[in-house]
Image: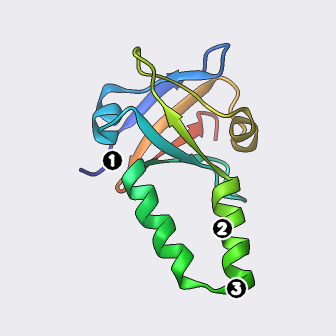
């Protein structure tokens, strides 16, 4: 299933968002990965199994020092997240700051992933 659509959301005082039902269904589980790629001003959402495929593939491309640098970049900038019973997700503060998110956000589907953007960007 591909991620698609555009969804307005608001970050609450505890830095949580409520996942849209369609995105929640596309994730297919309460657990997923949020990745904040260095140099980008948005957050990426991946299904857990998809994230494992991506990281496994990338980590076998390089060897030695380059692979170690890539591992640090990938795993330092990603976090496992989980939706609670009300479909709320606590976003990591450091990712919120990197993405310039303050309150109003949009979640967009982009095929193999979803993205979280500050609405004013």
> In x, y percent, where is residue 43?
58, 46
**Residue 120: quarter of image:** top right
Q: Which of the labelled discs sits on residue 56, or is there none?
A: none
Distance from the alpha carbon under mark 1 to that under mark 3: 35 Å
Q: Are marks 1 and 3 in contact (CB under 8 Å)?
A: no
**Residue 85: quarter of image:** top left
The residue at which mark 2 appears reads as 71
Residue in view at x 61 percent, y 31 percent: 91
The residue at which mark 3 appears reads as 64
Helix or strand or loop: what does disc 1 sit on? loop
Residue in view at x 64 percent, y 41 percent: 121
Crowding near the residue tagged with mark 2, few <14, some 14–19, many ≥20 C-alpha atoms within 10 Å: some
Q: Nearer the viewer, mark 1 or mark 2?
A: 2
Q: Which of the labelled discs sits on residue 3, or is there none?
A: 1
Crowding near the residue tagged with mark 1, few <14, some 14–19, many ≥20 C-alpha atoms within 10 Å: many
Q: Of marks 1 and 3, which one's residue comes earlier in the chain?
A: 1
Distance from the alpha carbon under mark 2 to that under mark 3: 11 Å
Helix or strand or loop: what does disc 2 sit on? helix
Residue in view at x 45 percent, y 57 percent: 51
Q: Of marks 2 and 3, which one's residue comes earlier in the chain?
A: 3
């Amino acid at each position: 299933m591909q991620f698609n659509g555009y969804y307005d959301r608001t970050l609450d005082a505890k830095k949580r968002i409520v996942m849209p039902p369609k995105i929640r269904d596309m994730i297919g589980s309460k657990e997923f990965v949020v990745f904040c790629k260095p140099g980008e001003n948005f957050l990426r959402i991946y299904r857990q199994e998809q994230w494992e495929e991506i990281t496994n593939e990338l980590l076998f491309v390089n060897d030695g020092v380059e692979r170690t640098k890539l591992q640090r970049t990938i795993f330092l900038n990603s976090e496992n997240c989980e939706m609670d019973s009300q479909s709320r997700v606590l976003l990591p503060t450091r990712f919120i700051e990197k993405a310039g998110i303050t309150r109003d956000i949009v979640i967009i589907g982009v095929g193999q992933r979803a993205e979280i953007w500050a609405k004013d960007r």
